[in-house]
Image (cartoon, rainbow, N blue to C red):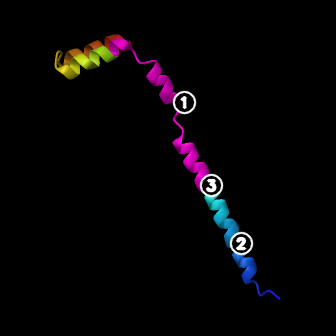
């Protein structure tokens, strides 16, 4: 006859299985790229990229960069 120890083990076993399934689902969702992030990369303006390169090379100063960036994005 069982004194309840077998029942406790079964309960813990199923809790562990459930925790593994939940952890796997969380990992899967977090490993997927965001749909919005791909769209923003695809819509990136070539003019804005050129402007950022000019600023990075030091060809234009910060004020000029910000003004031109506003002109491009508006």
Question: What numbered label is drawn on residue 22?
Answer: 3
The total number of labels drawn is 3
Question: What numbered label is drawn on residue 35?
Answer: 1
Residue 42 in percent (x, y) is at 47, 20
Query: In the image, is residue 73 part of the stretch drawn in magenta?
Result: no
Give left or right: position of 43 versus 51: right
Residue 12 in percent (x, y) is at 67, 72
Residues at marks 2 and 1, CA–CA distance in whole angstroms: 39 Å
- 55 shown above or below 22: above
Residue ID at (62%, 59%) = 20
Depth check: give the residue in front, 64 or 58: 58
Give left or right: position of 29 versus 67: right
Residue ID at (33%, 15%) = 48
Q: Quadrant of the C terminus?
A: top left
Question: What numbered label is drawn on residue 9?
Answer: none
Depth check: give the residue in front, 28 or 69: 28
Earlier residue among tags 1 and 3: 3
Magenta region, residue range? 23-48
Q: Which residue is the site of mark 2?
A: 11
Report which quarter residue 73 is drawn in.
Answer: top left
Report which quarter residue 70 is drawn in.
Answer: top left
Residue furthest to the right:
1
- 6 shown above or below 12: below
Residue 66 in percent (x, y) is at 26, 18
Residue ID at (28%, 19%) = 52
Crowd around label 1: few <14 · some 14–19 · many ≥20 (10 Å): few
């Amino acid at each position: 006859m069982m004194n309840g120890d077998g029942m406790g083990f079964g309960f813990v076993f199923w809790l562990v299985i459930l925790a593994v399934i939940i952890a796997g689902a969380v990992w899967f969702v977090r490993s997927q790229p965001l749909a919005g992030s791909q769209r923003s990369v695809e819509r990136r303006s070539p003019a804005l990229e050129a402007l950022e390169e000019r600023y990075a090379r030091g060809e234009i100063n910060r004020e000029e960069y910000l003004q031109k960036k506003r002109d491009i994005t508006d």
